[in-house]
Image (cartoon, helix red, strand yellow):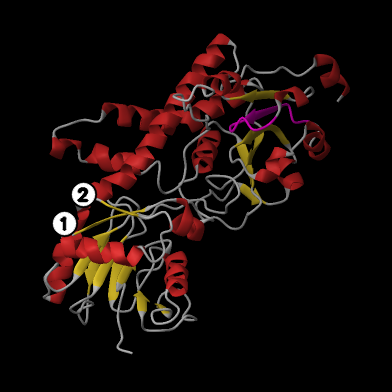
Amino acid sequence: MKEQTLLKIALVSSILGLAILFAVARPGDAGQVDISSIDGTMKGNQVKILGTVQDMHNAGEVQILDVSQPSSITVFVSGQPPLKKGDMVVVKPTVPMGTSEETIIPILESASGLKVERDFYYVYSPERISVGQAVKDIEANYPTILAGAGQKSAFHGEQLYSLIAKKGVKVLTSLKAAEAEKIFEGIYRDVNIALANELAMVCESLGIDFSEVREAANSQPYSHIHKTGIGVGGACIPVYPWFVIGMSKNIGFVPELTKSARMLNQSMPEYSVDRALSMIGNSRGRTTVLGLSFRGGIADRRLSQTYDIVKALLKRGCKVAVHDPFAGEDPNLPKEVILTNDLGKALKGSSLVILSTDHPEYRSLTEKEIKKYEPKIEALFDGRAMLNPSSFSRIRYHAIGREAVPASKKLEQTA
């Protein structure tokens, strides 16, 4: 059988999931996968996926530089031209609108001497995955979104992704539209999280429970109030708004709502730390922060809100210990900060606990367990509103959008 390169370059963080799905989709002819920059264990020559977002510096024929920064992608092609006639280039990272047409395609054409649509095909198809469930998201949870540099590219892209996308393929009319789609997904969530945080602050001022009001409001089918949060982390949601804000001068329009929402969410760690410290009379002892991952159940720490919480605590003169079930060394934490997966070690000597990440392990955390490890803990600030406030009597409890629950003086004295 003549070799057919279905996918020449995919600049993606979900590369392994894609490779597996394409291999399974066409086991008879295009079932072999060459992932040159992962571990070299999967070899073949039918579906070539060269390079990942995490390790692009030595990706065979193509070198990708400076992709560690989510706000920019720089493509640098060296050596032999990476493209030959008939190849398809699929780019998947989230990029500012216009990146494909203004940056990537011109570089590929210049380096290869080929012309898009005439000699090779170019498709932009944004990643639509959550960490920890990439294969399921790609294959079954959502339709694939894509656009081509022209009708030929769009046709071949649709044919390719129809092999694996059970929810179908939505072909948009332009590359800019496909680039915007993923950015708008993130901005929608960022703005709605900001709205939830603002409404939660209103509830705090009124002495009512935001969670109770939210649940009642969302019983109406047109209301979709999000949950509050101590911060918005990850490499996606806190980054995408800046793509639009940053191009405001060029497009002659300032996205005020997008900018205001981002600033509010960005302020939540500082706001939460001040609220938490006020629970213990603004004393500057040791604080334990629960969770380093940006969300629960995963080990991903990229742009985690916990870094901002730790920074705010240190700025206020506190000593800090961080607990996380996935704990390991972390060069992004200051050296004086303790990081451990031992809850007892993390709590020892602290007077305040701040819950930052909604790890499943924390859902069953009780006052009794906390006091067992450190009897002198005075307060717990629940940054995810995931614990039951009525279960705390000897520890002062507070969550965003909930009125602080004072500890019982009688029980406090006998603790």
**Eyeballing the image, is 288 above or below 235?**
above
Element on which disc 1 rests: helix
Residue 316 appears in which quarter of the rendering?
top right
What residue type is disc 2 on? Lys
First to last magenta residue range: 376-387
Residue 385 lies within the magenta run: yes
Q: Which residue is mark 1?
A: 101
Q: Nearer the viewer, residue 179 or 265?
A: 179
What residue type is disc 1 on? Glu
Q: Nearer the viewer, residue 224 or 28?
A: 28
Residue at 47% in and 73% down = 24
**Chief secondary structure of the magenta portion:** loop
Residue at 47% in and 80% down = 42
Q: Which residue is mark 2?
A: 176
**Quadrant that contains the N terminus:** bottom left
Q: Report, in whole angstroms, how far the alpha carbon at label 2 lies from the one at label 1.
A: 8 Å
Element on which disc 2 rests: helix
Residue at 53% in and 49% down = 333
Residue at 45% in and 78% down = 27
**Quadrant that contains the C terminus:** top right
**Disc 2 to disc 1: CB gap under 8 Å:** yes
Residue 85 appears in which quarter of the rendering?
bottom left
Left or right: 190 as drawn, with respect to 131:
left
Q: Residues within 10 Å of mark 2 (few under 14, many from 20)?
A: some
Where is residue 263? Give x, y as percent. Answer: 37, 30
Does the image show residue 97? Answer: no
Q: Residues within 10 Å of mark 1 (few under 14, many from 20)?
A: some
